[in-house]
């Protein structure tokens, strides 16, 4: 099933590069294939990616404040973008999956591809060190780093949720106040965000109705992106 | 007001060490003191700390799964632990604060100390590189890394919230189901967590009542820790 992993190492690190075969094999093993899987390397790779992107964004946006840097990083590092980079590397061809995932097309699933890419970054960090992992990540994500220079990256959650749904021809979400707690000067709003077509619902909270709606929208977006297998 | 920053550099990096004076000054400047403050360095330092701790915990707990590693890191890197390390370094003596924070004791405030320590880590990373920042962080946190080897680190949010409140002689929280959405096979619970003494309330959600309660407890804990200035 799996392609020759030496080809992947070349694509990641260049012709003369080496990467410990046991680490690479583990990075490419989904949890459905057994206990010696890629989850720990994914944890390490996620952290390495966070630092590499934090540094790259600080350099690229010397006047952005912390909030803007965080939003840009979230736009750059997420399941969709990681899966897209994994596809460019044909990472799906190298994955080891359990029988259930094999049968249902796990090789092409965004979440599995995104996690495997993080695990591969973790393996490169563990074997070659931080500078090596950074060089590789900056090369793999170069075009995307430039792209988040656009204004799109900093849209608020309600706007992003609406656009996500519209892109899939689904109806716009509804928001309703479920409860208001606290006294007049210190109110807490609890808001539900509801999708009419599936009945999915998330709860948000905040010191204003608007903040509670943004919170609920962010949670809905996170759930939709976590569930979506396309 | 501020102590000689060379003493801080010695405490952080050793006798012969250097750190760019402009970066250090910025790391020690709270946002209340002006626009050239430490928020960007805090963003960078937070990411560096995340990777350094991820690697240290992977090495220390070779059999822990990703969830356990995440919980141990959260127990190791949080406002309380960062503020405690900052106090050992007497970081408060070196801070630049605006007049309002000066008057109200900002030098001793957990959140300001924790943020400043992250910014100092960011400054060391930016000037001396990753290996240098890692050596420093592992030295500063050595005792704490050993301490999270205890089982305490992996308690669930409801337990931690109850213990946090009991340690402050406050009543236990109440949980109530606010709404149940979805059909019988795919229910979504929305739960409120409420503190009787202050009336504070957070919303949680999940596919079971227990999960929604844990979610609401985690949010309450996060809010209490963010608010607490002691």
Image (tube, coloured by chain):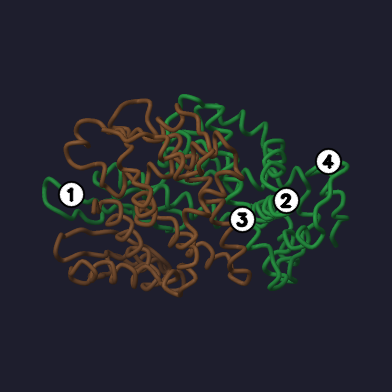
Chain colours: A green, B brown
The answer for how far apart the CA atoms under marks 4 and 1 are is 57 Å
Q: Which residue is mark 1?
A: A187
Q: Nearer the viewer, residue A52 or A204?
A: A52
- Read off the residue under disc 2: A124
| Dot 3 or dot 4, earlier in sequence | 4
Q: Nearer the viewer, residue A67 or B93?
A: B93
Residue drawn at 56 percent across, 31 percent down: A148
Q: Earlier in the sequence, mark 4 or mark 1?
A: 4
Q: Mark on residue A44?
A: 3
The image position of residue B119, as x and y in percent, is: 43, 39
Q: Position of residue B135 (x, y in %)?
A: 57, 49
- Dot 4 alpha-carbon crowd within 10 angstroms: few under 14, some 14 to 19, many 20 or more: few
Element assignment for label 2: helix
Instruction: Choose top left, top right, bottom left or bottom right for residue A202.
Output: bottom left
User: Which residue lies at the image location 41% right of the left edge and 30% below the top edge?
Assistant: B26
Q: Chain of mark 2?
A: A
Figure quadrant of the C terminus of chain B: bottom left
């Amino acid at each position: 099933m799996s392609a020759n992993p030496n080809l992947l190492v070349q694509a990641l690190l260049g012709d003369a590069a080496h990467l410990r075969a046991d680490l690479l094999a583990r990075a490419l093993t989904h949890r459905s294939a057994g206990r010696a899987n890629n989850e720990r390397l994914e944890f390490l790779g996620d952290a390495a990616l966070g630092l590499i992107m934090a540094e790259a964004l600080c350099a690229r946006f010397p006047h952005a404040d912390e909030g803007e840097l965080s939003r840009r990083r979230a736009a750059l590092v997420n399941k969709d973008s990681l899966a897209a980079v994994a596809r460019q590397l044909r990472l799906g061809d190298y994955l080891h999956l359990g029988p259930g995932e094999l049968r249902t097309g796990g090789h092409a699933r965004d979440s599995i591809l995104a996690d495997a890419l993080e695990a591969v970054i973790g393996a490169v960090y563990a074997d070659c060190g931080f500078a090596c992992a950074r060089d590789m990540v900056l090369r793999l994500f170069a075009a995307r780093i430039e792209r988040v220079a656009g204004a799109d990256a900093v849209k608020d959650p309600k706007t992003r949720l609406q656009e996500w749904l519209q892109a899939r021809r689904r109806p716009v979400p509804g928001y309703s106040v479920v409860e208001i707690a606290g006294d007049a000067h210190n109110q807490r709003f609890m808001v539900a965000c509801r999708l009419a077509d599936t009945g999915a619902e998330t709860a948000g909270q905040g010191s204003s109705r608007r903040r509670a709606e943004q919170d609920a929208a962010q949670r809905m977006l996170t759930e939709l992106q976590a569930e979506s297998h396309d």
